[in-house]
Amino acid sequence: MLRESRKKELKEQIFLQALQLFQEKGFEQVTVQEITAKCGIGKGTFFNYFAKKEDILLYLGESQIDLLQQSIEKHRNIDEPKEQIMLVLDDLLLHFSSHSELMKLATLEIIKSASLAGKESTRVQQLHLQLASMIDRAKQNGKLHSRWETDVIARAIVGVYFHTVLSWTLLEVQYTTLSESFRKQLEVVWEGIDCI
């Protein structure tokens, strides 16, 4: 377990150091050699974690999905479905905003690349499936009464989540916090979800 934790820490370090280089020099101008030098690792070590430079950007989604699993487990005992969903997605947004400028850069680079955006879509689908599972559980337990199908509800919530992230990234909208903006928007959508 300790070894896995160290591997995860090193992967996160490579990710953050690479993003700093991308921010300073531009994604296209940075080489793997520069990344390894900044991290103090060899190329072999780099390639143990990332097959190519572009894959560094995909780590953003990968790390978010790992955090999603942890957050779902952490908030599993919250009975009220809206609050549980908000807490889970708040955890993701907090992680995203903890290195705000670097995360914005990673998001922009993914958006610019059709190949990377296509690969990242699997992470979006994983988020959708996890939310759908939470919503199904709430319906089965009688905690959520909605005329809407689970899939429609999950897609609406994913839409609010990514609208919040993209507005923050692309439009440079200034929120008190990213989480506050998400919560306000989800409140509006939830009024249409939690009704028969």
Image (tube, rainbow, N blue to C red):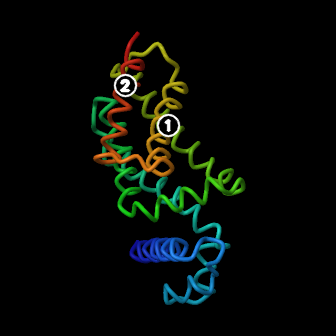
Task: Check the picture and name the quadrant holding the C terminus.
Answer: top left
Side of 93 relative to 47 (left or right):
left
Q: Which of 120 and 81 is in front in this view?
A: 120
Element marked by disc 2? helix
Task: Check the picture and name the quadrant holding the N terminus.
Answer: bottom left
- Residue occupied by mark 2: 188
The residue positioned farthest toward the top in the image shown = 196
Q: Position of residue 54 (x, y in %)?
A: 65, 67
Neighbourhood count class around disc 1 (C-alpha, 10 Å): few under 14, some 14–19, many 20 upward: some
- Quarter of the view holding residue 87: top left
Element marked by disc 1? helix
Side of 128 relative to 2 (left or right):
right
Q: Residue at 61%, 57% (x, y): give it.
A: 110
- Residue occupied by mark 1: 158
Q: Residue at 56%, 57% (x, y): give it.
A: 108
Q: Distance between the residues labelled 2 and 1?
A: 14 Å
The residue type indicated by label 2 comes to Val
Q: Residue at 39%, 75% (x, y): give it.
A: 2
Neighbourhood count class around disc 2 (C-alpha, 10 Å): few under 14, some 14–19, many 20 upward: few
Residue 181 bears which disc, if any? none
The residue positioned farthest toward the right in the image shown = 115
* Vertical side of 104 occupied by 93: above or below: above
The residue type indicated by label 1 comes to Val
Q: Position of residue 141 (x, y in %)?
A: 36, 23
Mark with earlier residue (2, 1): 1
Q: Position of residue 70 (x, y in %)?
A: 38, 53
Marks 2 and 1: which is nearer the front?
2
Q: Residue at 34%, 38% (x, y): give it.
A: 86
The mark tally for this picture is: 2
* Vertical side of 58 occupied by 23: above or below: below
